Image (cartoon, rainbow, N blue to C red):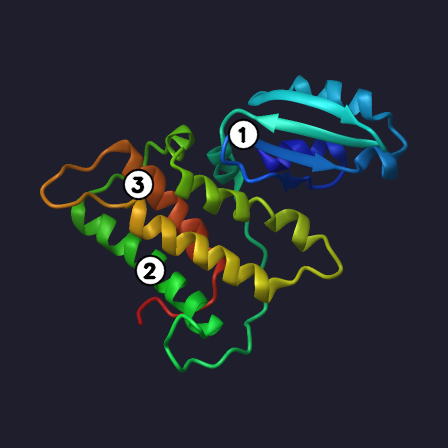
């Protein structure tokens, strides 16, 4: 989804708001390209999966997409530099632990999913609708814009993504609980875990 938006705008848009109620992006592309914001908004409205696009004052464009999880359809994480955080202490006060444990949890989800028979195919992005899933998606949506920035702030970004994923891991489980059978939502959340794992630095086990 972000790739299609970027193709129209000439640059990746950045997520707007919390995504709690709607998944929106904004872009100053009209200022940089010289194309009227109204024309860009019209082109965006013609894209599949876009529910609205409008020109804002100052040459900005705001676009709303129907399915936040659609960004995982063409997700390509950039190679992030390894943070220089210490491994210890392994407490929540240490950002290194927060990030590495987030990676390990996401990697663990993929192992457990295989053991529990969660299908890898049949990803339905529309099932990533819990507030915890949406919060992780909101942070992931920043990746293309940050990668194009001169000052991406990767260390702070990884901490934010890890914290969002820890909440999702605990409150929106990616694998069946107890004797419950796998459901399509688990497949979707395993896909989300794989995206997080590919971004956060750290070992697969802690």
Task: Tell me the element at label 2.
Answer: helix
Q: Residues within 10 Å of mark 1 (few under 14, many from 20)?
A: some
Q: Indicate which disc, 1 or 3, sits on the residue closer to the N terminus.
A: 1
Q: CA distance from mark 2 to mark 3?
A: 18 Å
Drawn side of residue 95 relative to residue 142, left or right: left
Drawn side of residue 6 relative to residue 65, left or right: right
* Residue on which the image places disc 1: 22
Q: Position of residue 52 (x, y in %)?
A: 64, 20
Q: Is residue 5 above or below residue 167?
A: above
- Residue at 17% x, 47% y is 116
Label of residue 167 in the image: none
* Residue on which the image places disc 2: 105
Label of residue 120 in the image: 3
Q: Where, by quadrant of the figure, is residue 176 drawn? A: top left
Q: Nearer the viewer, residue 24 or 119?
A: 24
* On-image quarter of the C terminus: bottom left
Task: Tell me the element at label 1.
Answer: loop
Q: Indicate which disc, 2 or 3, sits on the residue closer to the N terminus.
A: 2
Q: Is residue 91 above or below residue 9?
A: below
Q: Residues within 10 Å of mark 2 (few under 14, many from 20)?
A: many
Which of the two marks, 1 or 3, is nearer to us in this view? 1
Q: CA distance from mark 1 to mark 3?
A: 27 Å
Q: Residues within 10 Å of mark 3 (few under 14, many from 20)?
A: some
- Residue at 35% x, 38% y is 188
Outermost residue on the left side: it is 179
Q: Where, by quadrant of the figure, is residue 177 drawn? A: top left
Q: Indicate which disc, 1 or 2, sits on the residue closer to the N terminus.
A: 1
Q: Nearer the viewer, residue 163 or 100?
A: 163
- Residue at 74% x, 18% y is 42
């Amino acid at each position: 989804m972000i790739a299609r938006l970027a193709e129209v705008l000439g640059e990746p848009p950045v997520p707007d708001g919390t995504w709690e109620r709607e998944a929106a992006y904004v872009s100053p592309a009209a200022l940089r390209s010289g194309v009227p914001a109204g024309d860009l908004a019209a082109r965006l409205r013609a894209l599949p999966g876009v529910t609205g696009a409008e020109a804002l004052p100052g040459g900005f464009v705001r676009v709303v997409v129907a399915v936040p999880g659609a960004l995982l359809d063409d997700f390509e994480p950039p190679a992030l530099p390894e943070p220089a955080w210490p491994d210890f202490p392994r407490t929540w006060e240490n950002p290194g632990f927060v990030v590495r444990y987030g990676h390990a949890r996401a990697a663990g989800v993929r192992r457990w999913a295989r053991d529990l028979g969660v299908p890898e195919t049949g990803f339905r992005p529309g099932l990533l609708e819990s507030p915890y899933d949406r919060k992780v998606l909101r942070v992931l949506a920043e990746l293309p814009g940050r990668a194009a920035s001169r000052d991406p702030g990767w260390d702070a970004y990884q901490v934010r993504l890890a914290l969002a994923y820890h909440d999702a891991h605990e409150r929106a489980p990616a694998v069946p609980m107890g004797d419950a059978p796998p459901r399509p939502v688990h497949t979707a959340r395993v896909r989300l875990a794989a995206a997080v794992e590919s971004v956060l630095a750290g070992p697969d086990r802690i």
